[in-house]
Image (cartoon, rainbow, N blue to C red):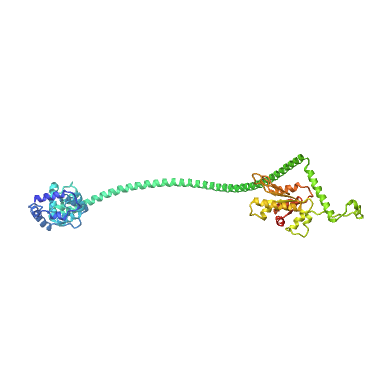
Amino acid sequence: MDGSGGNLRAEADGPETGAAEPTAATGAPDTAVTDAPDAVGDGTPGTAADGTADDAQEPTLDRPLPEGVRHRVVAVAADAFGSFTFAELPLPLRPYARFTPSRRAKHAATALAAALESDPAFRHKVAGKLREAQPELTGALDAGTPPPAADPLDVAAAAYLLRPAGWAKLVATAGEEAQRAHAERADEETLRELAKLREEVQSLHAQLRSEAVRARAELDAVRKEGDVAHRKLRSALSDVKRAEAAQRRIQAELDEARAAADRDRAAAETEARRLRTRVAEAEAAVESGRRAAREGRSIEDVRLRLLLDTVLDAASGLRRELALPPRESMGVRPADTVDAVAPGAFSPRDIATRALSETDPALLDQLLALPQAHLVVDGYNVTKTGYPSMPLEKQRLRLLGGLAALAAQSGAEVTCVFDGADLDMPVLLAPPRGVRVLFSKAGETADELIRRLVRAEPPGRQIVVVSADREVADGVAKAGARPVASVLLLKRLARV
């Protein structure tokens, strides 16, 4: 028996596995199981046979075992558990044989309590271990005089295990005392907690009142600040609106000033161009005067000579057309003494009154047949109207060839003007006989050069300007020239 008990204790002291393995339990020697009755039935007051007979006659509890007593009984049984052999353990407790006392008390509490209640032999074995551990307490209970200073729970647990006379009363009394002590402790704890809570509530009330007063003060301050901020915001919004209105007004004035400045700048640029043109014309006139002076005659003499030639040619033409004899041979006729208005000579404007179309080539022939007629041609305006797909050089050569033939046929003075404002250097060109070729200077258009040519002629000379530009036509018409369309010249050149 001693050898088998030693094996069980060695297994219990080994590594914890959480539960006893059935294979290990069944693998214990058979002598441990058979020897267990001999170990229990040793003739002591706590033997299993005597205990079973006594328990049948002992009183039982009429209520459940108090909680504190039950925990104390389970703790005593868990402490004594490790001193039993595997065979001495009841079957429900054998899976917990390898547990430590602390784990056994935690996980096997229900099984231990059930085994102590239903297995008197196991209970007597645990009681025997208790006698060995606490002989004074167990001796006093056997004598029927529990020590007054002992813990009621220890007394009740020992009475439950030893089952002396009146043990049920001892257990009930100890349970009541334990409950009363627990209730007293709970009441004291509750009173202390209640007093503490009251203090905390009073402190919280005072804190809440202080917080409420401070919150009211802060709320009033915030309200005042909000009112001030609201007034400032309204004032700022009004200022912003006024500033936006002022900005719009200033922007409108600025736009108007910019527009006026643009108009003034445009007018100044136009005036500057006009003044530059006048200056250029004046410089050209001065240069022409200088050239005339160097040649021994002035521009005015040339103008007078041209005018005189025009008048003489016109008079000769009228004389030939009327077949009049010389004035010296006719003398004064009676009709010559009558005061009346004599008919005037034909001019370019008078020819326009005849029944000819503005694009009829015969109209150009009549104009060029006038005495001392001067034909001024806007070169590129004519070429781009008649043959725009050709290169500029070929346009110029074709036009100048036609003008040379026209000059030879009509005997009129012919001047062809090309736009040279964008030229970097003079164009290399050999003018044909009877045709004067001119290019405008840098910064000057052909239209301006044509107007200067017209103004350079003496009043009364027959000047015909060919251009489809309405601005050019209106300008030369005011200066006394006769404008004709470019199509008219193109049709006339087609007949050459």
| Residue furthest bottom as drawn | 355
Residue 252 lies, in percent from the top left, at: 62, 48
Circle count: 0
Pick whichever, 181 or 70, lies toward us. 70
From the top left corner, tell me how far across and down residue 241 is, in percent: 58, 49
Relative depth, front residue between 39 and 12: 12
Residue at (50% x, 46% y) in the render: 225
Report the residue that reaches farthest toward the right. Answer: 334
The C terminus lies in which quarter of the figure? Answer: bottom right
Q: Is residue 367 visible?
A: yes
Q: Residue at x 23, y 51 (%)?
A: 180
Q: Judge from the rendering whether residue 141 lies leftward or rightward of residue 235; answer left or right.
A: left
Whole-percent x, y for residue 465 in the image? 73, 52
Give the residue at the far top of this rendering. Answer: 294
Residue 134 position within the rendered picture, expressed as x and y whole percent measured from the top left: 14, 47
Seen from the viewer's position, the closer of residues 426 and 252 is 426
Residue 141 visible in image: no
Query: Toward the viewer: 123 or 272?
Result: 272
Residue under the image location 73 percent in, 57 percent down: 361
